[in-house]
Amino acid sequence: MTAPMPVSLTVNGEQVDTHVLPRLNLADFLREHLQLTGTHVGCEHGVCGACTVRVNGDIVRSCLLLAVQAHGATVETIEGLSDSGEIADLQSAFRNRNALQCGFCTPGMLMAAQDLLKHKPAPDREQIREHLSGNYCRCTGYQAIVDAVEATVRLRNASPQGGQAS
Amino acid sequence: MKASAFAYARATSVGNALELLVAHGDGAKVLSGGQSLMPAMNLRLLAPEILVDIGDLAELRGIERKGDVLRIGALTRHVDLLKSVEIAAHAPLLTQAIAHVAHPAIRNKGTLGGSLAHADPASELPACVLALNATIIVRGPAGERRIAAEEFFTGIYETALSPQELLVAVEMPVAQQDSMHFFHEFARRHGDYAIVGIAAQAAVQGGVFRDLRIAFFAVGDRPMLAAAAARLINVAVTPQMLADASTALGEQLDPQEDQQASPAMRRHLAKVLLARCVSALLGRPDLAGISA
């Protein structure tokens, strides 16, 4: 049973049917098998948050999930959220506020921030910090990131449609 | 790092999971949410021959109240506990504690049963089930066993579970009208492992404890009930009684040394938490600063 196993899942709206080794985690599967390299691999033990993706609508650590466990799941990566325009405003706020420097943590930060805004449309700074507490940034610092999320909150709540579709 | 190679089997029922565990013995590990198991495997601290994935077993999921008993399926995720109206009403200690367990992305996968079976002495939920006087329900080839939380945790990452058994559910008494709870932990950052933490469940009538269970975590090789709590039941607590209880607590605890804190610091913080807990539960600000 250490041989490759069949898995079928949806990634960013596309059906994927393939075989993987049990030990392959979802992050490596996305990066190396599907060439979706926006999902970053940092600590590989669930601490840094760089590998955060959405599985069945919930954000998870893709380094702590086996690809075989994602059988039957709907996976969305930063490429999916980016291409659909779901987080265009958040991305633009990150640019405007210099909320990224090297960009390594950014996909995970965007995933976690969008997750917060989906569940809580008007979080305060403390709630933003708490929700992003599982994502590490090693260069820009957190102030600008929290600023960017806060700016997006204001923008989405100001526009009549509640901002970008989510 | 990456996990070393292993085989993988997706259990189709509890019976099937048990068959797999019996067949593979010590070489098998149960995969639930994987939020503790996968890090340990990626760090090569663990290298099981086979993972038995119980993630599809819907029968192990869910929260149900039957009379005075609250039953929580082992696969119930942290996020489900956090958002559950039933838990908030009948075991609010858990609602409060869960918010301190790691981060949202971890809570979306991590499960109650997984956390208890992993038995990390610094984690919140084992201490909560001790304070809540819960019963851990496990199933094995010989049938079902019900284990009191106090008997379940036996050491660092060690429990009363045998390699052939599966933790299936947790049962606890529902909170009564006079029930009160207290939870607090000291940690460097939100979501980090606690340096010292406390989880307490009490019955208070007329300013007197009728029952009091205080569990500490990150103070030893397993979560621990403070024996000194018994001194505070059915008496009008005086500062001297609390100071004596605090001394007794310090003698009972045998905290470990690590990069976060020395044993003396942990002992001190545990005493601080004891005083805050008793003071908060009794609504007695005069007791807040009392520690031996």
Image (cartoon, coloured by chain):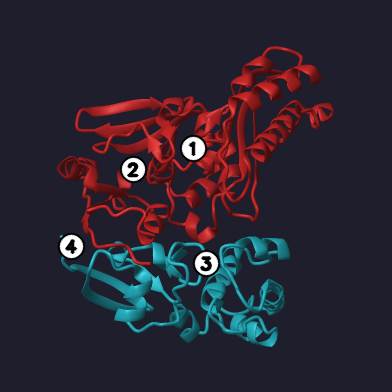
Chain colours: A cyan, B red
Q: Is residue B177 visible?
A: no
Mark 3 → mark 1, Cα distance in angstroms: 25 Å
Q: Is residue A50 visible?
A: yes
Disc 1 residue type (three-letter) = Pro
Q: Position of residue B182 (x, y in %)?
A: 66, 35
The residue at 52%/77% (across/down) is A107
| Residue A110 or residue A142, whichever sits in front | A142
Mark 3 → mark 2, Cα distance in angstroms: 30 Å
| Residue B160 or residue B182, whichever sits in front | B160
Discs 1, 4 touching: Cβ within 8 Å: no
Callout 1 crowding tier (Cα within 10 Å): few <14, some 14–19, many ≥20? many
The residue at 35%/31% (across/down) is B160
Label 3: state its secondary structure: loop
Label 1: state its secondary structure: helix
Check disc 4 and report the residue beneath it. A2
**In what quadrant of the picture does the N terminus of chain B appear?**
bottom left
Callout 2 crowding tier (Cα within 10 Å): few <14, some 14–19, many ≥20? many
Check disc 3 and report the residue beneath it. A48
Q: Position of residue A140 (x, y in %)?
A: 66, 79
Check disc 1 and report the residue beneath it. B126
Using the image, tell me which numbered label, if any, was put on residue B283: none
Residue B263 is left or right of residue A66, and the answer is right
Label 2: state its secondary structure: helix
Q: Is residue A17 positioned above or below B190 on the image?
A: below
Q: What chain does mark 1 sit on?
A: B
| Residue B290 or residue B140, whichever sits in front | B290
Discs 4, 3 touching: Cβ within 8 Å: no
Mark 1 → mark 2, Cα distance in angstroms: 19 Å
